[in-house]
Amino acid sequence: MDKSPLIELIGVEKTFGRVQALSNINLKLYEGEIVSLVGDNGAGKTTLTKIISGTESADDGAKIILRGQEQKNWNAAKARKLGIETVHQNRALSEQQSIYANVFMGRELVNRFGFVKRKEQIKETEALMRKIGYTSKVWTPHSPVLKLSGGERQGVAISRAILFDSSLVMLDEPTTAMALSEQA
C-alpha cells in the first residue's frame, strides 16, 4: 500500500501583475522526507514556500491537500495549527528580546493561572540550542538576539520552528545571513 503524502499541491499558480511566478506546480511531500528546492533567484522558491506556509495565497484553482484533506481558505494561522512551520529569509526575530523570549514568542508556556513559566522556557531553549549544535560560552538563553551572529540568529529561528513538534519545517534561504564559516 502506498504511503500517502503529508502535503500535496495540485495546479499551484501564482502571478504578480503580469509576472508568472509559479505555473502549474504539482508537489507531494512525505513525512520524514528532506527535500530541497533549487533554482535561480526569481525562480519561485520563496513564493512556493510562502504558499505552503499560508503567508501568500495561490491563484484560484490550486489545491492544497494536507493528510488527505483538501484545505479551504488556507492561511498562516491554519498552516501553523496543522503543524507547518517556516523559517523565512528575514527570520522575524525581535532583536531586543532574549533568545528564549524569541523562541517562545506568541506561544509562551503558561501555568494554570496564566503566568509564564520562564524557567521551563529557558531550560527548553538550552536543550533545543544544544540539539541543533548551537552551544556557546558567550551567550545564554537570557542574551539579547542583537548580540548574536547571523548563524546564531538562524539557530534561534530554527529552534523556534522545531520546538512544537512540527510535521513540516521549511527553511527559506537558510544560509543567506550566515558567515562562510557558519555555512559548512
Image (spheres, grey):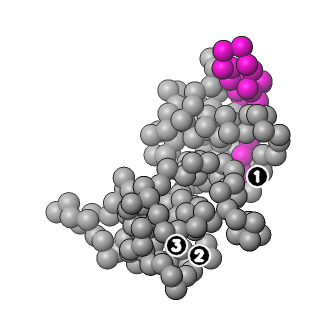
Residue 113 position by quadrant: bottom left
Crowding around mark 2 (Cα neighbors within 10 Å: few <14, some 14 to 19, many 20+) is some
Residue 35 numbered tag: 1
Q: Residue at x 74, y 27 (%)?
A: 22
Q: Which mark is residue 134?
A: 2
State the image coordinates of residue 118 (x, y, percent, origin top left). 30, 71
Foreground mark, 1 or 3? Answer: 3
What's the amino acid at mark 3? Answer: Leu
Residue at mark 3 to residue at mark 2: CA–CA distance: 9 Å
Inspect the image, locate mark 1, and give the three-letter code of the amino acid beneath it.
Answer: Val
Q: Does the stretch in magenta take in 167?
A: no
Would you place residue 21 above or below residue 124 in this image?
A: above
Residue 114 disc label: none
* Residue 38 seen from this side: yes
Query: Residue 136's spot in the image, x, y percent?
Result: 55, 82
| Residue, disc 3 | 128
Badge 3 crowding class, 10 Å Cα cut-off, few under 14, some 14 to 19, many 20 or more, is: many
Q: Which circle's residue, 2 or 1, is located before the other in the chain?
A: 1
Q: Residue at x 75, y 66 (%)?
A: 180
Residue at horizontal 48%, vertical 78%?
Answer: 139
Q: Which residues are magenta?
A: 10-33
Closer-to-camera residue (152/115): 152
